[in-house]
Image (tube, rainbow, N blue to C red):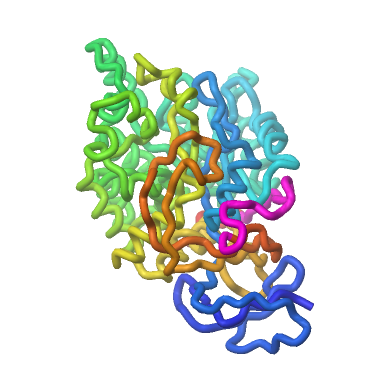
Amino acid sequence: MGTLIKNGTVVSSTYSQKLDVLIEGERIIKVAPSIDPTGHTLVDATNLLVMPGGIDVHTHLDMPFGGTTSADDYTTGTQAAAVGGTTTVIDFALQSQGHTMAEALTTWLAKSNNKACIDFSLHMAVTDLDPNKTGSTAAGLAELEDMVAFGITSFKLFMAYPGVLMIDDGLMFQVMQKAASLNALCCIHAENGSAIDIVVAQTIAAGHTEPHYHALSRSPKAEAEATHRSIALADMAGCSVYIVHLSNEDSLAALKFMQARGAKALAETCTQYLVLSIEEQMPGKSWDEAKFVFTPPLREKWNQDPLWAALADGSLSVVSTDHCPFRMDQKALGKGDFRKIPNGGPGIENRLQILWHFGVNQGRITPEKFVDLASTAPARIFGMANQKGSIKEGLDADILLWDPNVDYTISAATQCMATDYSMFEGWKVKGNAAKVFSRGELVVDNTTQPGKFLGATGRGKFLKREANAGGLT
Ligand SMILES: [Zn+2]
């Protein structure tokens, strides 16, 4: 007795075909042209696309930042993800300087314990290899081994936020060498934080304190420089590297330059950089533009076409959200000083809608590419392809029934995310999640109970991931 999804079109990263999908318990047990329905619960997927559930590899739930905490915790954040068709997230545990990675892991597992509603994993952000001030990085490097043994096989390294999260090139290089030996992946926030902080201080000194100047003070060149530098260092160390939230054409050129020279370099962009711009969303007219203060900032609109082209040609591998939501009362901490505006925007719920509407509907990417960018590539790159990311026998039954013909209007009034605004307020899109299964359980049915999470709070499991060097050989 299983659940049989019948009459739908299975879309994988490489093909689309009319196929039935049989779920038993938490797994997909059969994918075939016509499966006998006898004894099974039937789910009719006529006119629907049957896809692997989305995987968002860049989220910040319950994250402390600048004296406040991101508005979505593991419950609201993962429920919003599921309502939008995402069934797995990878969040970030942040090591604090002077503390061990083990402490960070304990803290983040406590945040998610009994709260996560879909499956999740963690990257470890490494900020200090000698937290106990012994004069040696040996213990810190040994902790990287502990993390990989625990199933945390990707490390985040910050080249921005000096004094808080940024590490210097020597430390970054040591982590990369160790990661290479462990087959782990280094994820890079690529911005030249030292130079940016000088520009920021000069901007404030000149009296420019509005949200608009957050964007102007973080040059695309500072991102491109750090993109090139981090990939060059990773190449020297023999390490696979993944640039997070690549936002502009300059950085894309740096990425492609190193990819063409054989560096093991991958990158994601995020939904917001594909459809929002400094001209349209933050022209410098109001405080309201604080909604769009995140890092890297929005860029000039002309950058969008090259980013879409890079998704289509494979130089960019993934679209994530960098979901880091703050309400406007939290953003208000930075009224009068853009440096104090909590950085981040809400997007976890809208990623697939935006990617489908502006990608597939506008002919920029195929439905198969959509599946690859949203699910299959993230699973492969982050060592989860044996559990997630495909409609395949033996994998977890994380299944998204996608309705490509339904109209949907994005609005803060109806969203599940815990912010009082949407970055896409009032936008009309065609294409939305109809039903969402997580490990075989129907957790969202937008056709009968729109915007509701139907599963139990805390049902999400921590995923241990393989160390596979980003799937690059
Ligand atoms: Zn982030």
Q: Give left or right: position of 225 versus 320.
A: left
Identify the residue shown where x is 61% and y is 57%: 449
Q: Which picture quadrant has residue 370?
A: bottom left
Q: Give left or right: position of 422 versus 201.
A: right
Task: Tell me if residue 458 is in the magenta stretch.
Answer: yes
Identify the residue shown where x is 25% and y is 28%: 216
Identify the residue shown where x is 37% and y is 45%: 272
Residue 238 visible here: no
Residue 133 visible here: yes
Residue 181 x/y as whole percent: 56, 48
Q: Nearer the viewer, residue 451 or 389?
A: 451
Residue 432 x/y as whole percent: 47, 61
Q: Nearer the viewer, residue 410 or 171?
A: 410
Q: Is residue 42 above or below residue 300?
A: below
Q: Is residue 154 above or below residue 55?
A: above
Q: Which contiguous range is marked in magenta?
A: 446-466
Residue 362 x/y as whole percent: 29, 64
Q: Nearer the viewer, residue 433 or 202?
A: 433
Q: Is residue 436 above or below residue 14?
A: above
Helix, strand or loop for the magenta stretch, by majority: loop
